[in-house]
Amino acid sequence: MRSDALRRRKQILRTARELFATHGANVAMESIAEASDVGIGTLYRNFAARPELVEEVTLDMLQDVRQAAERAAAGLARGENQAWQEFLDALVGLNLGALSESLSLQLPQTIGERIMQPQRDTVRVVNQALELAKAADLVRQDLTGNELITGIGLATRPLPRAFAKAAPGIGNRLTRIMLDGMLPNPAMGNP
């Protein structure tokens, strides 16, 4: 693929990802093309149909999580404890909650190997980073990789507008509280 075509494809993916997270995966393909500054023909040359675009956005999200986990694992292996916090910040910044919710409504009931293998690879690297964080006593010993990703996904789901408007910043505060619960010494009485 030519460099300009690859750049356009990446722009479409980035824009689709943002729009899916904000408006759900049912956003009009025309809106994605317009926001990407490409024509609808260019969009369809890159992604023949919505399911193909949704699948590519899912793969893109998995790749970002895996890369963040790889950076964290490498940093933790070198004794750089701040790599764990950087990993958590990266996961929160990926807006996993909003994106996962919208994508799950569009993915087929039976997810194929094209997504399953990258998902397994991502889980493996997340667990590797988590084990290194446990060894450095940066996180609860009983936390699993699935709990980590699910918790961040739940914490980063969009709040109803009324809540967000009535209490600006509440989403960030609740996310911070949830992340603090993952620390090695959570408040007494918490399971």
Image: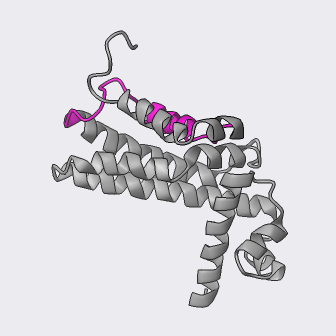
The quarter of the displayed image where residue 163 is located: top right
The quarter of the displayed image where residue 7 is located: bottom right
Identify the residue at image location x=63%, y=36%.
166
Q: Is residue 155 above or below residue 88?
A: above
Q: Residue furthest top?
A: 189
* Region rendered in magenta: 135-160
The quarter of the displayed image where residue 162 is located: top right
Q: Is residue 34 above or below residue 116?
A: below
Horizontal relation, residue 177 to residue 12: left or right: left
Horizontal relation, residue 176 to residue 38: left or right: left
Task: Please check the rendered image and state whether residue 147 is part of the magenta-colored stretch, yes or no.
Answer: yes
Horizontal relation, residue 71 to residue 176: left or right: left
Tell me if I can see residue 20 in this picture: yes
Quadrant occupied by the C terminus: top left
Task: Please check the rendered image and state whether residue 116 is part of the magenta-colored stretch, yes or no.
Answer: no
Tell me if I can see residue 2 in this picture: no
Identify the residue at image location x=54%, y=48%.
119
Residue 17: give x, y in percent of width and height: 64, 60
Q: Is residue 44 above or below residue 187?
A: below
Quadrant occupied by the N terminus: bottom right
